[in-house]
Image (cartoon, rainbow, N blue to C red):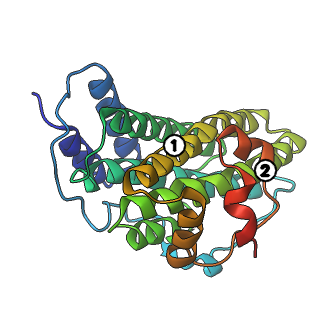
Amino acid sequence: MQFSLAGAALAVLDVPDPERKARRSRAAASDWRGLRITAIGEGQPPDRPARPESPELLPPNRVKKRKIGPGTAGRFALLHALAHIELNAIDLAWDIIARFTHEELPRDFYDDWVRVADEEAKHFSLLSDRLAALGGRYGDLPAHDGLWQAAEATADDLLARLAVVPMVLEARGLDVTPAMIKKLQDAGDEESASVLQVIYDEEIGHVAIGRRWFQWLCAKRQLEPVSTWQRLVRERFRGPLKPPFNEPGRSKAGLSADYYSDLVG
């Protein structure tokens, strides 16, 4: 049955089970690409997406950090934290689709964010498989709620959402992922390292999409992009930006240093 893209987004946001959420995300993306969904539609997403009973969500400073060492505990904790990020990223992608349909946005905007939602679901499933291979599952460890707090802080303005989520949070992923890949390789876990390499390569595209639409919307609103981005980050993001920055990865995404160099903590 034909229904709208906004309706498909709400259907993903409404699923609490992580594995089902990922499958529904990929199915909705397939329906959009296959033109089984063609209407954008409109809808009001929830303040918070449906979530499973576990993991327990804690403030970021209460989530225990574990180093990769002998055994699997450190690797499991790292992959679990990344799976939590990717689960949130599925919801963030569908939320941006459903929440801002009142804006006059071209179809390319929706094509890009459906692609992001599809790839975030793929990333979650890849990480979930690695957690299972290490003897556990997503939900076995506590996690923090910082990502969705950023969504709440930018729910009123598409420009702010683009400034903070892809251009700060996902760009931070580009900074830290190469070192994580190296640590997993040093621990002999080539399978997990390969998964992170897939995620890293595709996240460059996600940052590029965020940067592209941020600049497009700045042009539409007759705003200068760099100064506008810096203002929005100061207003909407908690804390300074943390170096070191992966300048080659950021450059591939079109995120030049003139954006972020003045905001270093």
* Image coords of residue 133 (percent x, y): 63, 39
In this view, the residue farthest toward the right is 186
Q: Residue at x 55, y 79 (%)?
A: 59
Up-down relation of residue 65 to residue 221 (above or below): below
Marker disc for residue 246: 2
**Residue 65 seen in this snapshot:** no
Q: Residue at x 79, y 39 (%)?
A: 189
Place of residue 265 in the rendered image (x, y in percent of width and height, measured from the top left):
75, 76
Residue 197 to residue 256: above or below = above
> In the image, what residue occupies the spot 79% across and 64% down?
243
- Any mark on residue 212, and which? 1
Give the amino acid at mark 1: Arg
Measured from the top left, where is residue 41 in percent x and y? 15, 42
Whether residue 28 is situated above or below residue 168 in the rendered picture: above
Give the answer, above or below, for where 40 lies relative to 86: above
**Is residue 167 among what the camera can see?**
yes
